[in-house]
Image: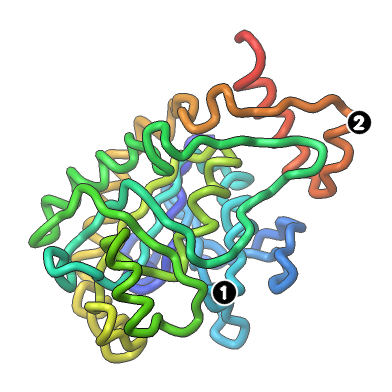
Amino acid sequence: MDKIAIIGGSGIKDSPQFRDVEWKSFDTKYSNGWGDGIVDYQQNDEVIFIPRHGRDETCRYLPSRAQYGANLIAAKELGATVVVAISAVGSLVREINVRDLVIPNDQKNDSGRDSNFYGVGFGIHGNPMKPSPFSEAVRTALIEEGNLHFQKVHKHGVYVTIPGDFFGTPIEGRTRAQYAEIVGMTLFPEVEMAIQLDLHYGCAAIPVDNNLDASHEDSTIRNMTELSEVVPAFVSGAIKRLRPLAADPPKLEQLMGNIIPADERGLARIQNEFLRENARRLIQRYCRQE
């Protein structure tokens, strides 16, 4: 249980660390109603790579349908304690330019998605203000490594998640710029689901457009292709920095004092076997004296 999971896509799947590594599949038996719960992954040198939107382009999950929960369950069951998410985003402010690196410290959910793994039989009132929705240890490692690879690194920023799969309208962009610096389609519910699995989670957000000029082909793919050497090198360096954390992860501040314990009758209401066992582990780790 000391692995690091990378969740992302462009700029990661062609990394030398995963090149020629065998693809495997893991059945989480957890479905969000759109996916089948089967997650494709690669593993090399205690690092797991999971493509957020699926590996096979004939069965691709767009942001509004992605298997966020299944991806994270697979990472946890395969032994990950730390997750680094890579996200292509749009910039909402002049200070953040295309191909900068943003390590968000807060998030706003405009997606309307449900992040709750439980809600029946067992509960978590996670506190994303302690000190943020992200692991500060992961954020620090990403910032320090980012300074070696990107022209400019923004240590703070609010990431607003939109529903997808369309980009936002002009008025939506102007409205969101009042409370966020970057906009994307995938951070939520991933960030809150990671907390519920006791995973140290951080996001490396890479602006690929200035919102109004967003285009999947002309901005996202083109800019991530231009960063095809920078991003893998950054990820490889971040992995090295995060190994001590993965080996001995402290309790998440967001969960401390915020677990609502349940007895076996309550836990029996959790249908997914892994989530039921995870609830037991959370109760043991956060609700009882060690």
Q: Nearer the viewer, residue 120 or 103?
A: 120
What residue is rendered at 54% in x and 62% in y? 41
What residue is rendered at 31% in x and 59% in y? 179
Check if mark 1's residue and mark 2's residue have beta carbons within 8 Å.
Answer: no
- Residue type, mark 2 in image: Arg
Q: Position of residue 86 (x, y in %)?
A: 36, 61
Residue to which mark 2 is pinned: 265
**Local crowd at mark 1 within 10 Å, few (<14), some, or many (≥20)?**
some
**Local crowd at mark 2 within 10 Å, few (<14), some, or many (≥20)?**
few
In the image, which disc is placed on residue 64?
1
Q: CA distance from mark 1 to mark 2?
A: 34 Å
Above/below status of 122 relative to 188: above
- Quadrant in which residue 227 is drawn: bottom left
Q: Nearer the viewer, residue 68 or 40?
A: 68
- Residue type, mark 1 in image: Ser
Q: Indicate which disc, 1 or 2, sits on the residue closer to the N terminus.
A: 1
Count numbered badges in the picture.
Answer: 2
Q: Nearer the viewer, residue 70 or 262?
A: 262
What residue is rendered at 31% in x and 56% in y? 204
Identify the element where label 1 is drawn: loop
Q: Position of residue 266 (x, y in %)?
A: 86, 33
Q: Position of residue 175 (x, y in %)?
A: 34, 71
Direction from residue 123 to residue 272 in the image, left or right = right
In the image, which disc is placed on residue 43?
none
- Looking at this view, name the residue that lies furthest to the left: 151
